[in-house]
Amino acid sequence: MGGSPGPRSSTRMSWLLLVRPRVEQDLAEARDWYEAQVPGLGGDFLDEVAKVMELLATDPGRPPFYYRGFRRVLLRRFPYKVFYRVEGERVIVFRVLHGRRDHPRWLHGSHPHV
């Protein structure tokens, strides 16, 4: 009553979260790099990604479209972005990429229909 509406949210309580195999390699490379810089930082990176994955499993429609149906979520502490699509009842994570990469080029090879 009289207040502003709350944030947009999905009507579903939980979505099926699928992680493409290439994501595991993206995460391992980034974790190893951060761990080599400062012991423990690689684990912090993975914790941050886990928070994003939890968000995607509950509210994948919040971030706007980015490129050809892909959406992205920026990590708060690290310069990485999680790229995903919502397809039916599934949230499919395609890549976790550094913010300075050429994302359309990297994503182009990630989509099964390309």
Image: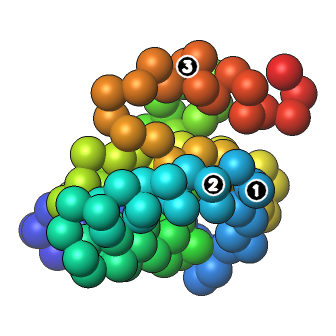
Q: Position of residue 90 (x, y in %)?
A: 76, 62
Residue ID for mark 2: 25
Residues at marks 2 and 3, CA–CA distance in whole angstroms: 18 Å
Mark found first going from the N terminus, 1 or 3: 1
Q: Position of residue 33 (x, y in %)?
A: 36, 55
Secondary structure found at label 3: helix
Q: In the rendered view of the protein, which quadrant contains the N terminus?
A: bottom left
Q: How is the image coloured?
A: rainbow
Would you say residue 59 is visible in this rendering?
A: no
Which residue is nearer to you in this view: 105 or 29? Answer: 29
Secondary structure found at label 1: helix
Residue 72 against residue 114 in the figure, above or below: below
- The nearer-to-camera label among 1 and 2 is 2
Residue drawn at x 35%, y 47% as measured from the top left: 80
Q: In the rendered view of the protein, which quadrant contains the C terminus?
A: top right
Q: Amino acid at mark 3?
A: Pro
Q: Amino acid at mark 2?
A: Gln
Q: Is residue 22 left or right of residue 44?
A: right
Task: In the displayed orientation, state which residue is furthest to the front.
Answer: 36
- The nearer-to-camera label among 1 and 3 is 1
Q: Is residue 62 left or right of residue 17?
A: left
Q: Is residue 114 left or right of residue 72?
A: right
Residue drawn at x 55%, y 19% as measured from the top left: 104
Instruction: Tell me if mark 1 has few (under 14), some (14-19) or many (20+) residues whose alpha carbon lies within 10 angstroms of its own.
Output: few
Q: Position of residue 5 (x, y in %)?
A: 24, 63
Q: Amino acid at mark 1?
A: Pro
Question: Is there CB contact under 8 Å for labels 1 and 2?
Answer: yes
Which residue is nearer to you in this view: 39 or 64? Answer: 39
Residue ID for mark 1: 21
Which residue is nearer to you in this view: 29 or 104? Answer: 29
The circle on residue 104 is: 3
Instruction: Tell me if mark 3 has few (under 14), some (14-19) or many (20+) residues whose alpha carbon lies within 10 angstroms of its own.
Output: few
